[in-house]
Every structure is written in C-alpha cells, then in structure tokens.
Image (cartoon, rainbow, N blue to C red):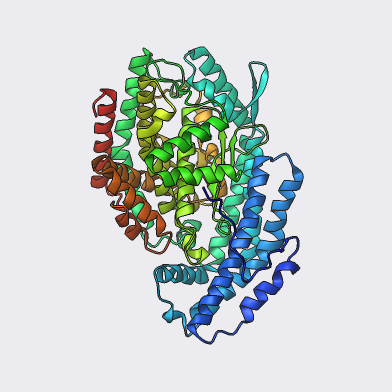
Amino acid sequence: MKIPTKPQRKFVSENLVIDSWLKLESYFEDLKNRKIENVEQLKIWLKDRSELEAVLEEDMAWRYIKMNIDTTNSSLTESFSFFINEIEPKIAPYTNEFNLKLTNSPFVNQLNGSGYDIFLRGIKKQIEIFREENIPLNTKLSEESQKYGAITASMTIQYEGKEQTLQQASNYLKNTNRAIREEVFYLINNRRIQDENKLNTLFSSLVKLRNQVAKNAGFKNYRDYMFASLGRFDYTPQDCFDFHNAIEKEVVPVTNGFDTDKKHKLGLDSLKPWDTSVDSSGKEALKPYKGADELIEKTISAFNKLNPYFGECLSIMNEMKHLDLESKKGKAPGGFNYPLHEIGVPFIYMNSVDSQRDLVTMVHEGGHAVHSFLTRELEITGFKDTPSEVAELASMSMELLSMDFWNEFYKNPEELKRAKIEQLEKALETLPWVASIDKFQHWIYENPEFTTEELYAQWNEIMKSFGSNQVDWKGCEKMQSVLWQKQLHLFEVPFYYIEYGMAQLGAFAVWRNYKQNPQKAIEQYINALKLGYTKSIKEIYKTAGIEFNFSQEYIKELVDFVKIELDKIANNRS
C-alpha cells in the first residue's frame, strides 16, 4: 500500500501559509495579467489556476473539518471565519475575471480532450450569474449557515446519569422497552424545541439573504438561481415536480405498508413516532461493531472482498488519519466525505454510535471516498468537481453493492438478514423524505416572504402526502411540525437534496445490474466514477449501465425490483 503524497507544485510556493491575502495576491495577479499567445500557454495557465484552486480548497477544507470536530474551540471557528471573511471575498472577483479571460481567449476552441466542453459550459453559466454586489452577501451566507452546526452540536440530553448527544440518545429509540423509547423520544424532541425559535430566526435570515442574491443576479427566485449555480443542465424544476408525484404514487404506498406490517408484528393498536425505529420483530437493535477502530477494520475487509481497490482506498485514509468517526460532545452533527483535491485523499467525518445506521453511513461515505481516489489523476480541478447527482450515485450504490459482504459485521445469519431488510426498507423510505424536503424548498423560495405559521402549515401539508399514514402523531403535533429543522441541507446547502433521490434510483439500477453480472456491474461503476465531471450526468449514468430517469414508469420498475429482493431475503431465497 503506497501512501500518496502531494504532487510537486509548479506554480504555488510549497511553503505558502495562508494567513493573509497579501500572501495570495501575487498568484491571482499573475493569472490575471499573464499573456496567453497559443493553446499550449492556455493549457499551462489552466493548470496553474487549477493548482491554486486545489491549494485553496484544501486549506479551507481543513479549517472546516477541524471546526466541525470541535465546535467549542473558538480558535478553530475563527480560523474558518478568517478564510470566509478575508480570503473568499477577494477571490470571487478574480474568479469571474479568470472565467472571462478563458472564454474570451482566441484559443479556447482549440482546447481538445475529454471534459473541456462540460467544464466550459459550467464556466459560462458562472459568468452569467456573477454579480459583484453578491460577494458580501455570499460571505454573509457562508458565515450564517455555519451557525446551524453550532446550535445543533450543543443539543444534548441527560439520560441514565450521563450527558448524551442526540445521536447517541437516538440509539434508545431502538430499545425493545416501549416506555424507554417514549421517554427518550420526548427528551430528544423537547430539547430540539428549545432551539426552535433560534433556528426559525436563522432560517428566515438565510432565506432573505438568498432571495436578495437571486434578485441581484436577475432571477425571479432563488430556486431558479440555484438551478443555474448548481449547473443543472440535465433537468428542470418540472422534472423535480414529476419526481415528487411519482414518489407519492409509487413509493409512499410501499413504505406505508412497512409501517402497517410493523404495527401488526409489534401488536400495537397505534404506531407512535417512538415506535418507528425499533425492529419489527421486537428484537434488540443491531450492533454491527464496537468502536470506531472496529468499524473501519470491518469496512475495509468488506470493501476488499467487493473489490481490492476499494479496500485499499480506505486503508490509505486510515493510515493517513483522514477519518474522524465517533460522536462526541461539541462535535457538529452529520457525516460527510470531504474531497481534498491537492493530496487527492479525502477525509471522512461522521458521528458513529455503534449502530446499523452508522455501518451504512460508513460504506456510503466510503463510496464517496473511492470516487475521490478514482478522479485523482484528472487533468484539472474543475474536472473533479462532480455534480451531486453523480457523487451520490457513487455513495448510495456502495451501500447496496457492499451488502453481500456485511457478514464481516454479522456472523449470525438472522442478524445479517435483518440488516439487509432494514437497509432496503430504509433506502425506499429515503425517497419520500427526499421528495418532501425538495418540495418544501421549492415552495419556500417561490414564497420567500412566508410567515412562520405559513411555513409550518406548508410542511404539515407536505407531510400528509409523504409521511406515513400509519404513524399516529396525536399529542406530538408540535414535534412533527419542526421535523424539517433536522435537515442540515436546508440551512447549509440549499437545493442540495433531490440528488439523493435521483442517486437512490440510480443505485437500485446499479445493484440490479450487479445481481445479474457482478463483475460487469463493478467495472461499469468504476468507469462511470473515473469520468469525474468530463461528461454530462446522463452520459455518466449510461456509462454505469443505467438510466438518468425519474419517470413514474421507471420508478415503479425499480421499486418492484427492490420488493422482489426484499421478499427473497425475508424468505431466505437467493
């Protein structure tokens, strides 16, 4: 196993320490003023720009990672804020000038090779939406959105004589003792409600700022601005609405059926929200591992069996200490794989509490990590910035592809069966939740002057369409009304969420191919991920041997396939 090292820099000093704008300005001025007299010089200019971007992105990434690991350390927060307030605003105008310099170059049409057409398409869109007056607004948005992590990281409860994060406490919701589940459910949700108004105020301010950014850029609303900003060339808002409708018709009845079955098996007259996480058969929660070391060891072993390259990627990250997995006080919630484009070895961050959900999170982020490794050698940084529809295909497919090797975690065949059933049911249940969050966002940014009462009313209306018709929220209506506040994406990365639904469908299709021909499916998966963002989303999906399609007909086809596989697992049929 060879540990990667950063490539030797050709443009940026190896000794650069980013503690002031003055240390960076000369690089930006060089790129701005450099004469380009032929296509070869243009390529060198692009590579130098790409190197500078990779250095800056990686520096900012480490500040973000460290701040999230310990939100109580003010110096780490200040370090991140310094980059957001002192560096990024000064980069923005240069970025626009570089984009113009590139697209206006007489040699731009001579850039040949895979990826430049896709790259330039995105650059032209960024030029279209750039406005100088949005620079301070985007700085403010970056800073404000980070407050969500600090607020939620401080949420803890006292239970069994000790302080516990909400992630740790959520394990009790799988306890077979219904009284314990109910007690902890109320503790968790009452703690969330303590910060309800604080989060409402934060969210309203974010929406107001975002709406202003959209107006400044000449867009009717922030939704349309974000479709341009995210480079959504392959689908429209109407496609999203079609997705919502298809999920409501084809998936919600299936997931409601899971809850009907659970209520029956648990012998309950009424399925309450604290009953939704416990095992249907009333067995203790699955415990696939104990501690972060065992989690990474068993994941590497499973990945090795699926494909040795996948295991090697995680082994390298482990060796380089690019993993921080366990939940602890002061650590921001959530999980992510953060690409580090200069070294090419990403960082996995999560809040594990020894649960089955954490196993899934680990293989999910592991899929992202493999994707990062597979794009390491692409020519410029822009080719590695894959759209989320592709990035999430990498991770959600890995959840399903790795299932054949979860016996690394479960030696007991019955526990392994339970884990697989839970995974497939949760994967289907992901789709209505994704549709609800996405539909909510469309409404929010089409109606940015909403009152809190209107916001809650809209959320509750959406829940009638996508929530379970079997779960009885009577007496907990307030808690249901604030469920949306749990979704980090609404606060930190608006409109980045429907990608999970699209990618989940894609992952089902990848897994279906794998069930038919494992070797070919893995080859197609790898070949698709290697493309980075050098092809359109539709072409990347086609390379993976699947469709980028969220019509009702296609969704029904994939859901029917998953139902058949669930039946096979439940009845011990291969």
In the image, taking residue 207 as reference, residue 14 lies left or right, namely right
Residue 208 visible in the picture? yes
Residue at x-position 47% and y-position 26% = 288
Image coords of residue 464 (percent x, y): 39, 34
Residue at x-position 61% and y-position 35% = 196
Q: Quadrant of the C terminus?
A: top left
Q: Using the image as rendered, state which of residue 485 and residue 277 is in the foreground.
A: 277
Residue 465 visible in the picture? no
Q: Is residue 314 above or below residue 130?
A: above
Image coords of residue 492 (percent x, y): 57, 48
Number of callouts: 0
Residue pushed farthest front? Answer: 1
Q: Quadrant of residue 276?
A: top left
Q: Using the image as rendered, state which of residue 13 and residue 549 is in the foreground.
A: 13
Q: Using the image as rendered, state which of residue 94 and residue 323 is in the foreground.
A: 323
Image coords of residue 572 (percent x, y): 26, 23
Q: Quadrant of residue 257?
A: top left
Residue at x-position 73% and y-position 52% = 79
Image coords of residue 461 (percent x, y): 42, 37
Residue pushed farthest bottom? Answer: 37
Q: Is residue 101 above or below residue 214?
A: below
